[in-house]
Amino acid sequence: MTANLKVAVVGAGGISRRHAEAFASTGRTTLVGVADIVAENAQALADQHGSKPFGSVTDLLAEADPDLVAVTTPPGSHAEIAIEVLAAGKSVLLEKPPVLSLAEMDAVAEAERSSAGSVYVVFQHRHGSGAVRAAELLAGGALGAPQVAVCETLWFRPRPYFDPEWRGTWVGEGGGPTLGHGIHQIDLLLHLLGPWRTINATAVRLDRPVEFEDVSMASVIFESNAVASVINSLLSPQELSRIRIDTTGGSLEVNHLYGYKDADWKFTPAPDAADTWTSSAGDDVASSHEAQLGRLVDDLLAGRTHDTTLASTRPTMEFVTALYASALTGQSVRRADLVPGHPFYAALNGGIDQAKLTESFAP
């Protein structure tokens, strides 16, 4: 690969600008194309970055010949676009959530196996320096053994947020705050604590005009026997993103909203325990798109595998799937059960009739 990575963006909505700006900030990429079914949106983003607009992924792939395609369309189209890009032998970066079901994830994984390209997923909270340090210290036992954790995504989205026709629907958005919002903190929690075993969950729709939940809660047991509570809300005016992990050595906590810095992390040693939380030895890297996409560009140009692969994010999609399955069936769900043939493998709503779903999400 050359010293300048050729990138393209598919989908010219709001989040696409963050991708384009993050790529540009590396100084090691060329934006060779922007595709969107709305011509003026593609034109606007392309003009902003000196690139060329396209009306379809097919045209972009044929003419622009990118090394990497960032997919920033509504989630319902991610799998189809990723498979087309992989068929052309190109690599894909999927904005979260990567897909809408485990079935879609496995279909993309199958396409990846027969492609020269690879699939990566945007979970930027893994890539801030605070999380990098936390993951290393937890994995090495320096902070003690995790026992109890809390994971909170308490956000606020007013009713007009759901005005776009794809929002608030299973087909377009795929799910509520569990899939589209809390997935950031869920992914970071799993990145820090490792594999989970079982989930018991509740999901309700209290106010927003959506087909699914606007609040969900889960009780989780990990393979390490640590336990955690997880809450996702779109009804919380005082917004907060928070993870707290209580270990045998102390309490590790990060409080932020849409991205943290090192100062947002705190470790409180247990009584009579040593303070084993060390300051960052390098730069203070915020958990931004710039952090992850900069690392992704470095990795691809160096011929390395970027660590936030599609496969590495499957446990997160399994967690989301299990939360919906538990909430809608009223039963505990084991990670080991989420295989082809499980009622929720093909769709997060379990294929349940919408009328019944409406009743199921009633408080």
Image (tube, helix red, strand yellow):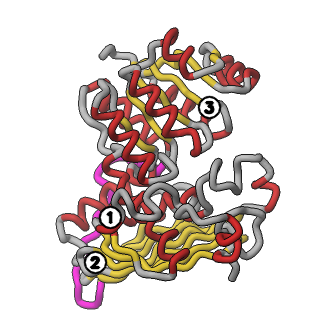
Q: Which of disc 3 and disc 2 is earlier in sequence?
A: 3
The residue singled out by tag 3 in the image is 11
Label 3 crowd bin: few (<14), some (14–19), many (20+), radius 10 Å? many
Quadrant of the image containing the C terminus: bottom right
Q: Is residue 291 visible?
A: yes
Magenta span dominant secondary structure:
loop
Q: Of all residues shown, which one is farthest toward the bottom?
A: 271
Residue interval drawn in magenta: 270-287
Which residue is located at x 28 percent, y 66 percent? 195
Residue 165 location, x and y as percent? 76, 47
Residue 256 location, x and y as percent? 54, 64
Q: Is residue 256 magenta?
A: no
Locate residue 40: give its quadrant: top right
Locate residue 116: give its quadrant: top left
Three-letter amino acid code at the position of disc 1: Leu
Which residue is located at x 65 percent, y 19 percent? 55
On screen, residue 267 above or below 129: below
The residue singled out by tag 1 in the image is 192
Looking at the image, residue 159 sits to the left or right of residue 8; the answer is right
Q: Which of disc 3 and disc 1 is earlier in sequence?
A: 3
Q: Nearer the viewer, residue 215 or 198?
A: 198
Badge 1 marks a residue whose secondary structure is: helix
On screen, residue 102 above or below 189: above
Mark 1 vs mark 3, foreground winner is 3
